[in-house]
Image (spheres, rainbow, N blue to C red):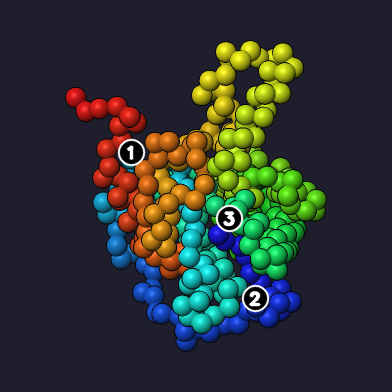
């Protein structure tokens, strides 16, 4: 699971002290260079085909080779696993793994914006993560809140200085995304978060609610079981209050009460899990009923453009029957 890191915040605990060891990191091939196209909001890959587009419409001739506009997923979900293992394999503090993971998330968000993917849901902190050692939980929550607070100031400052259609700075988890019109939604059991963090989340969601680009859904203190239970509790209250009858309860009613009701596209078309583990880890259990699953061998900090495009191509090769049959 992923949280932001700032070198100045990692000195409170020797266990999580951050230091930069670039000589320990394996070299990665340089990404394709980007150049602006003649069309607004488009970016062209110079050396391996092209893709881009800010928004839902993406032209076929600017997609990477092998990808088709009509069958791109609208909603991609990510289980970002392997940050701590990545750090341990390199003899680095745990915090270094999270910092490296931030770069991977930034790259995937940018790709989703360019490809016109509508929703990206990321599993940032699960309900089960609360059972980790207290020092680790407190460390992660402190980083999350500090990053939210710093970047909310940036968001508000840029919103005051720029028009609605101009580029604004939106930052989540302490990494800066100079991207246009990202909408932020946070799902999960917020009652376990500090009051100050709850207020920051509310302000961030309010400030970005009218943005029409990529919707970034960040799951914090979340589990699929929690989501189903809270939906059932809301429905039970409505039955108790006489607003609905028990016979009115169906799949559609439950879906309306799930926390993914914050998006027009609540059901992921594609779930990507990194680190080679073959499980979904209690993420979006109801919503994943007919989702295509892709398990990447890469640890999350090593997951980038090449791996993401590989997952998209695998998705496009599948025939989705939704429980039906071929005739």
Q: What is the crowding at mark 3: few (fewer than 14 residues within 10 Å), some, or many (at least 20)?
A: many
* Residue annotated with mark 2: 16
Depth check: give the residue in front, 299 or 50. 299
Q: For the residue labelled by badge 2, is the local secondary structure a helix, a strand or a loop?
A: helix
In front: mark 3 or mark 1? 3
Real-space Cα separation, disc 1 to disc 2, in angstroms: 45 Å
Q: What is the crowding at mark 1: few (fewer than 14 residues within 10 Å), some, or many (at least 20)?
A: few
Real-space Cα separation, disc 2 to disc 3, in angstroms: 18 Å
Q: In this view, does 283 lie to the left or right of 327?
A: right
Mark identifier at residue 124: 3
* Residue annotated with mark 1: 70
For residue 243, above or below residue 22: above
Image coordinates for residue 245, horizontal then vertical, percent:
63, 12
Viewport quadrant of the N terminus = bottom right
Depth check: give the residue in front, 164 or 296. 296
Image coordinates for residue 147, horizontal then vertical, percent:
69, 62
Residue beneath the point at 30% across and 66% down = 47
Q: Is residue 327 left or right of residue 313?
A: left
In front: mark 1 or mark 2? 2
Image coordinates for residue 196, horizontal then vertical, percent:
80, 53
Q: For the residue labelled by badge 1, is the local secondary structure a helix, a strand or a loop?
A: helix
Q: For the residue labelled by badge 3, is the local secondary structure a helix, a strand or a loop?
A: strand
Q: What is the crowding at mark 2: few (fewer than 14 residues within 10 Å), some, or many (at least 20)?
A: some
Real-space Cα separation, disc 3 to disc 1, in angstroms: 30 Å
């Amino acid at each position: 699971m992923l949280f932001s890191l700032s070198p100045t915040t990692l000195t409170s605990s020797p266990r999580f002290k951050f230091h930069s060891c670039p000589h320990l990191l394996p070299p990665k091939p340089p990404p394709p260079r980007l150049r602006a196209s003649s069309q607004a909001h488009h970016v062209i890959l110079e050396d391996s085909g092209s893709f881009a587009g800010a928004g839902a419409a993406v032209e076929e001739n600017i997609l990477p080779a092998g990808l088709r506009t009509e069958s791109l997923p609208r909603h991609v979900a990510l289980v970002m696993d392997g940050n701590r293992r990545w750090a341990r394999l390199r003899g680095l503090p745990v915090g270094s793994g999270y910092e490296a993971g931030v770069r991977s998330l930034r790259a995937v968000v940018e790709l989703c914006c360019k490809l016109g993917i509508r929703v990206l849901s990321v599993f940032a902190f699960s309900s089960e993560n609360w059972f980790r050692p207290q020092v680790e939980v407190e460390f992660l929550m402190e980083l999350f809140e500090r990053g939210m607070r710093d970047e909310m100031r940036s968001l508000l400052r840029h919103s005051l200085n720029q028009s609605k259609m101009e580029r604004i700075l939106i930052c989540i988890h302490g990494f800066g995304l100079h991207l246009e019109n990202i909408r932020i939604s946070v799902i999960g059991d917020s009652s376990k978060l500090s009051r100050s963090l709850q207020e920051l989340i509310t302000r961030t969601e309010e400030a970005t609610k009218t943005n029409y680009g990529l919707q970034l859904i960040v799951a914090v203190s979340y589990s699929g079981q929690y989501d189903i239970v809270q939906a059932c509790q809301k429905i039970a209250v409505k039955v108790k209050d006489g607003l609905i009858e028990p016979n009115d309860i169906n799949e559609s009613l439950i879906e309306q009460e799930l926390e993914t009701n914050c998006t027009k596209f609540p059901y992921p078309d594609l779930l990507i899990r990194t680190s080679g583990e073959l499980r979904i880890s209690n993420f979006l259990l109801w919503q994943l009923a007919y989702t295509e699953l892709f398990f990447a061998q890469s640890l999350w900090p090593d997951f980038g453009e090449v791996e993401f495009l590989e997952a998209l191509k695998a998705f496009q090769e599948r025939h989705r029957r939704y429980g039906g049959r071929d005739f």
